[in-house]
């Protein structure tokens, strides 16, 4: 089965990400969805939207939070898959449209972690077995084996942070607008070796939304439809107990990428994809994504980082809006926020941030859990 | 017909941390052993038991009929420590378990109760484990007099290397040292009163009774395990009863290890057994709400210890005052611990083999898995597993990180994925090690620890610690 060209995005919206002290989930959801409505030219959502797909990891209320915020009472579904939650909500919406169940669905991803009163992740003490570290530490588990095998180090990670901070400084809706140097990154306080503060995504609140339409209706919206070429989800054994893990890769990305490329008919991702938003919850997560997505050979990320391959004006720009580094990671929102950036770039709507070469095919990548799950989208401007 | 109460195995455990006079900004060179933030009386006792069983060649644990846990600082007011230890040590389900608590003498009381049980012939073997983590009020001069340690002895009615005689027992009611129900800190009345009418009087009477049975004096005793709250009391009691001080085991422990409460006399006995020869006679005398004393005669030389006390003492690492206060939870906290129910008791019940015994499983395809599951991670078949206990194997670190964010008195917390030799991979924290002591390929062993105290109770699991070679 394939989802290729069976649905299209006709509108996208995104609220300002940040420490949104004066906004509750409702405000952020409404900001993102009103922008998506306007983008799609939707004037009567109660007539034009058939169903709602919500992605939130921390919501206490579930999809009611979205239906009550929008006063939009439609079939609603809440989706959750750790940090891939936003992309999973999109996948659920695409599948519903592709199956012909609905003509038009609204996807909303959001989270509000900054109501918890802590600046980092909260350390939840439950059970006894799954406690050893915080997310930075478990995402760092590839560092020692990878550094040992391929000779990479903290400087290579730092260059990823420098790139994403620079990109995020210009993105209007980003949380952190701070340009940093390699030296700043290396000298920052340690969070979990090898990650210093600037190797870690920020903690922020945010919401993003997209509107998906069936192929039959996609061209009736004011803007050119952005076609779904693939939406894929992959999983793999928990690396903490996987008897065969080499800690040089995250297998869920490899599994999801294989499925996404098959669906989209991509055989040479580095040549056929022109823009990527990848999951940079930590700098090493982005480095591994280059390789696990097949954008470069295993072990070659370091050379490409040095060469600037993935810089804003590089051969294959990655995280042009600054990524999770600059937007923070309100979990459910992240995957949808990535779609928002790709759609803006593909339509040439990013203003001064428009890429020199407008991308026709673009990829988003979320990975989460320990990590145990990954979701990938590939969108294209041509049907 | 009564049988002998014989010693089959012995083991001692000292935590790695040391609190010194310098740590507290005081003069002098006094030091004491200190349990870490992930240790309590039960984990110390379990560690000693594992050393004892390792010293006996990791004997078949299904032969152990009973387990007694001795402490003044039981982790629960109502709930048995011995039952937790029996599960942790992988003993049989039909093992007899009980705790003997509330007195510094509970270590020898447990030993003599075990002796009576095996000598009766009703049971063939009994494991006695003692551990104590007593807390003096912060700032009290006596804060450095206490120590934390575990000791364990396996008794049986045949085999082994020595025989424990029938003890002299004395009970004495007075308020000398006490801790009220629900209190944290140990109280003592005026020292001259409690020493003269408590320790010296009671220990003196017990020693007199032993001397009488020996034909007038204790000169023929080779080694003496003699509880002492402090070094001065030890010197005075030895002089008053003509005990050769050089034969008192651990006579310089006050000021180096500290008085380790319920485990102290048994710890001295273990130290004596490490060096004792065949034919030696040892005296074991203990104090607390009375006194007891017994003679131990060795017919063969005890086996060498799995980990010597001297070796464990040499591993000691001095901590700072701030570390001590944080580790022992002596600092004010932003929020009082809540009255939440904590981890699910039903989940704990289902997972006790995994969490306490570190028991996983091996599939018929040969793949080991922890925690247990219904489906094999490699071959995918269902329910073709045999349980395997991994706690006593070594492991190798596959990868690690150093988490500065995880709550810890001295960050970072080292987290590891560790592969058990011939076994599964486990996701475990490291303990008793500096961050740079853990790397890819580091050989580690498993140690039973208190992971956290959610629900205001100890929640136990395992950590890794570097294998520090065979201790001298």
Image: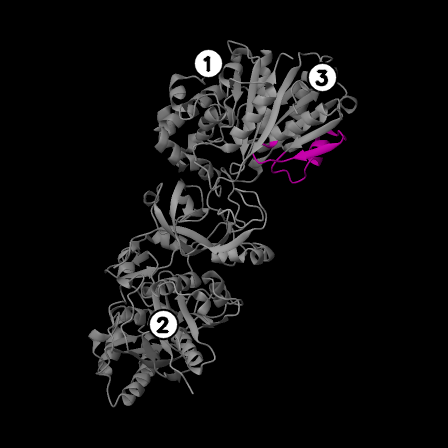
- Which residue in the structure is indicated by mark 3? A215
Kind of element beneath mark 1: loop
Q: Position of residue A203 (x, y in %)?
A: 52, 33
| Residue A74: mark | none
A62 shown above or below A172: below
Q: Position of residue A12 (x, y in %)?
A: 64, 20
Left or right of A214? Residue B122 is: left
Q: Who's the residue at 35% across and 66% down the image?
A: B56
What residue lies at 54% left-to-right and 34% top-to-bottom? Answer: A368
As drawn, A325 above or below B236: above
Instruction: Report the front residue among B471 and B392.
Output: B392
Rendered position, B112 above or below B394: below
Q: Mark 3–mark 1 contact, CB under 8 Å?
A: no
Mark 1 in CB contact with mark 2 (< 8 angstroms): no
Q: Circle 2 is placed at which residue position?
A: B8
Magenta region: A56-85
């Amino acid at each position: 089965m394939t989802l290729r060209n069976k649905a299209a995005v006709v509108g996208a919206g995104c609220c300002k990400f940040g420490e949104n002290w004066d906004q509750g989930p409702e405000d952020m959801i409404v900001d993102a969805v009103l922008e998506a409505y306007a983008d799609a030219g939707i004037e009567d959502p109660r007539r034009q939207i058939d169903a709602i797909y919500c992605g939130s990891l921390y919501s206490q209320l579930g999809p009611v939070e979205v239906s009550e915020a929008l006063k939009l009472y439609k079939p609603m579904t809440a989706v959750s898959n750790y940090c891939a939650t936003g992309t999973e909500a999109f996948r659920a919406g695409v599948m519903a449209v592709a199956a012909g169940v609905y003509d038009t669905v609204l996807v909303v991803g959001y989270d509000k972690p900054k109501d918890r009163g802590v600046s980092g992740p909260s350390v939840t003490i439950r059970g006894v077995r799954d406690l050893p570290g915080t997310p930075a530490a478990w995402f760092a588990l590839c560092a020692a084996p990878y550094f040992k095998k391929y000779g990479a180090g903290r400087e290579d990670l730092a260059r990823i942070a420098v790139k994403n901070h620079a990109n995020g400084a210009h993105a209007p809706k980003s949380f952190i607008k701070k340009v940093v140097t390699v030296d700043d990154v290396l000298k920052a306080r340690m969070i979990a070796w090898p990650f210093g503060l600037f190797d870690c995504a920020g903690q922020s609140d945010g919401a993003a939304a997209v509107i998906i339409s069936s192929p039959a209706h996609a061209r009736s919206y004011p803007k050119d439809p952005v076609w779904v070429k693939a939406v894929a989800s992959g999983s793999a054994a928990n690396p903490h107990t996987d008897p065969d893990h080499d800690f040089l890769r995250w297998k869920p990305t490899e599994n999801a990428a294989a499925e996404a490329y098959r669906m989209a008919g991509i055989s040479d991702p580095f040549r056929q994809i022109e823009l990527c938003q990848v999951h940079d919850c930590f700098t090493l997560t982005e480095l591994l994504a280059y390789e696990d997505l097949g954008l470069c050979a295993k072990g070659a990320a370091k050379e490409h980082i040095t060469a600037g391959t993935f810089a804003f004006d590089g051969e294959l720009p990655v995280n042009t809006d600054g990524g999770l580094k600059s937007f923070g990671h309100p979990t459910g929102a992240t995957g949808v926020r990535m779609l928002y950036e790709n759609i803006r770039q593909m339509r040439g709507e990013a203003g001064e941030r428009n890429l020199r070469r407008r991308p026709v095919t673009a990829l988003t990548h979320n990975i989460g859990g320990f990590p145990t799950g990954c979701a990938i989208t590939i969108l294209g401007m041509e049907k | 017909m009564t049988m002998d109460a014989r010693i089959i195995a012995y083991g001692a455990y000292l935590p790695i941390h040391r609190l010194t006079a310098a740590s507290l900004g005081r003069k002098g060179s006094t030091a004491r052993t200190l349990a870490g933030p992930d240790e309590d009386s039960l984990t110390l006792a379990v560690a000693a038991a594992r050393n004892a069983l390792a010293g006996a060649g990791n004997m078949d644990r299904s032969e152990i009929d009973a387990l007694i846990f001795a402490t003044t600082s039981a982790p629960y007011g109502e709930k048995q420590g011995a039952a937790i230890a029996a599960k942790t040590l992988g003993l049989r389900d039909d093992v007899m378990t009980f705790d003997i608590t509330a007195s510094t003498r509970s270590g020898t009381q447990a030993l003599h109760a075990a002796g009576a049980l095996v000598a009766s012939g009703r049971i063939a073997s009994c494991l006695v484990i003692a551990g104590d983590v007593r807390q003096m009020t912060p700032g009290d001069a006596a804060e450095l007099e206490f120590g934390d340690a575990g000791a364990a002895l396996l008794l049986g009615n045949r085999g082994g290397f020595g025989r424990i005689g029938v003890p002299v027992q004395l009970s004495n009611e007075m308020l000398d040292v006490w801790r009220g129900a629900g209190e944290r800190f140990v109280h003592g009345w005026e020292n001259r009163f409690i020493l003269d009418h408590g320790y010296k009087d009671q220990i003196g009477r017990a020693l007199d009774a032993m001397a009488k049975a020996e034909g007038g004096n204790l000169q023929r005793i080779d080694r003496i395990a003699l509880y002492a709250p402090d070094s001065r009391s030890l010197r005075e009691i030895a002089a008053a009863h003509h005990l050769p001080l050089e034969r008192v085991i651990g006579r310089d422990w006050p000021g180096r290890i500290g008085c380790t409460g319920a485990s102290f006399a048994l710890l001295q006995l273990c130290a004596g057994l490490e060096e004792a020869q065949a034919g030696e006679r040892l005296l074991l005398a203990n104090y607390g709400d009375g006194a007891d004393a017994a003679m131990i005669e060795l017919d063969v030389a005890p086996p060498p210890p799995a980990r010597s006390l001297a070796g464990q003492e040499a591993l000691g690492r001095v901590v700072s005052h701030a570390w001590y206060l944080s580790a022992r939870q002596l600092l004010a906290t932003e929020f009082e611990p809540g009255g939440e129910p904590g981890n699910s008791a039903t989940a704990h019940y289902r997972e006790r083999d995994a969490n306490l015994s570190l028991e996983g499983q091996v599939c018929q395809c040969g793949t080991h898995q922890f925690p247990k599951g219904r489906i094999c991670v490699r071959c995918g078949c269902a329910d073709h597993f045999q349980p395997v206990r991994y706690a006593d194997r070594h492991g190798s670190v596959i990868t690690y990180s150093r988490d500065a964010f995880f709550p810890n008195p001295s960050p970072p917390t080292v987290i590891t994925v560790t592969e058990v030799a011939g076994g599964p991979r486990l996701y475990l924290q490291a303990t008793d090690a500096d961050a740079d002591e853990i790397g890819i390929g580091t050989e580690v062993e498993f140690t039973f620890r208190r992971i956290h105290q959610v629900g205001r109770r100890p929640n136990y699991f395992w950590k890794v610690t570097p294998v520090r070679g065979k201790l001298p």
